[in-house]
Image (cartoon, rainbow, N blue to C red):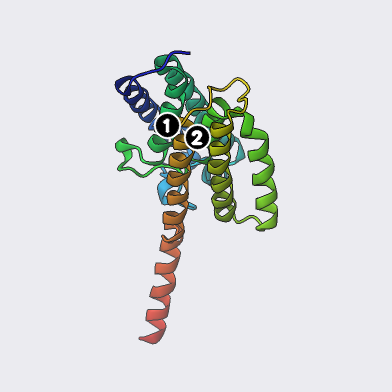
Amino acid sequence: MRKANARTLGFAAVVGYLIGTFPTADIVNRLSKRNGTKTDLRDEGTGNPGALNAAKTLGARWGAVVLGGDLLKAVGASLLGRRLAGDDGAYAAGTGVVVGHCFPVWNGFRGGKGVAASAGTAAVCFPAYMPIDVALAAMTLAYSKGRAGLATYVASAVFTASSLVWWKTQRGNLWGPRPSAWLPVYSAATSAVICYRFLSAASEPPSAYQPEVQSVSKKEASLVS
């Protein structure tokens, strides 16, 4: 597989970013036409335009559509990056698509948390690690009693450490690209973005609860007065 220069890799990353900004959840939200009203997933539920919030807000069927769409756009971007810039192009585009999904320029950089997008890129960029990733996520979720944030931080740390091992030892990567220095760069960058999204989301109260809080405050104020 040919080696790409910095310009070609940069182009692959930009293409990946643009594909990542494709608003899967927003389009599905419009198609669902829930109660015939216009809604924004950023203002409902957890405030995250992702598959889980879509499932909670719009229903399991629409949540599955969002999940499938996010996985497909990540897989497509990574494959296209490999086509444009060789093996390292897959890593560059894979990084770009996760960043684009989490920070889409068209929506004021208010995107999803990137878990599904990351899984889609891993299926192309790091398929040899996928069984470990799935098993680790399941065990961590069970041990943490469903705390997705903790499971994400643990999985991200092991994902990055494993990518270093794969690169240094040149282990096989199934149908994925040859492990190069770009593999740990891709894994560290995408993990950092996802962890940041979880941390920033944890520090903000869900927007869906704000009206309820405001109504309670008004009731309390009326009782006091």
Would residue 83 be seen by someone viewing this image from the given angle?
Answer: yes
Circle 1 is placed at which residue position?
97
Label 2 with label 1: CB-CB less than 8 Å: yes
Locate the C terminus by quadrant: bottom left
Name the spot of residue 48 as percent of width and height, x first.
Answer: 46, 47
Quarter of the image holding residue 21? top left
Residue at point 69%, 56% (across, down): 143
Amino acid type shown at disc 2: Ala
Name the spot of residue 155 as percent of width and height, x first.
Answer: 58, 46
Name the spot of residue 63 as percent of width and height, x first.
Answer: 56, 38
Mark 2 crowdedness (10 Å alpha carbons): few <14, some 14-19, many ≥20: many
Which label number is shown at residue 183?
none
Amino acid type shown at disc 1: Val
Quarter of the image holding residue 106? top left
> Which of 66/93 is in front?
93
Quarter of the image holding residue 211? bottom left
Residue at point 30%, 37% (across, down): 105
Circle 2 is placed at which residue position?
117
Which element type, helix, strand or loop, lies under badge 1? Answer: helix
The earlier-in-sequence mark between 2 and 1 is 1
Which element type, helix, strand or loop, lies under badge 2? Answer: helix
Q: CA distance from mark 2 to mark 1?
A: 7 Å
Residue at point 36%, 41% (across, down): 103
> Which of 86/210 is in front?
86
Would residue 23 be seen by someone viewing this image from the given angle?
Answer: no
Name the spot of residue 138 as percent of width and height, x first.
Answer: 68, 46
Relative to residue 7, is residue 102 depicted above or below?
below
Query: Relative to residue 87, is residue 107 drawn left or right?
Result: left
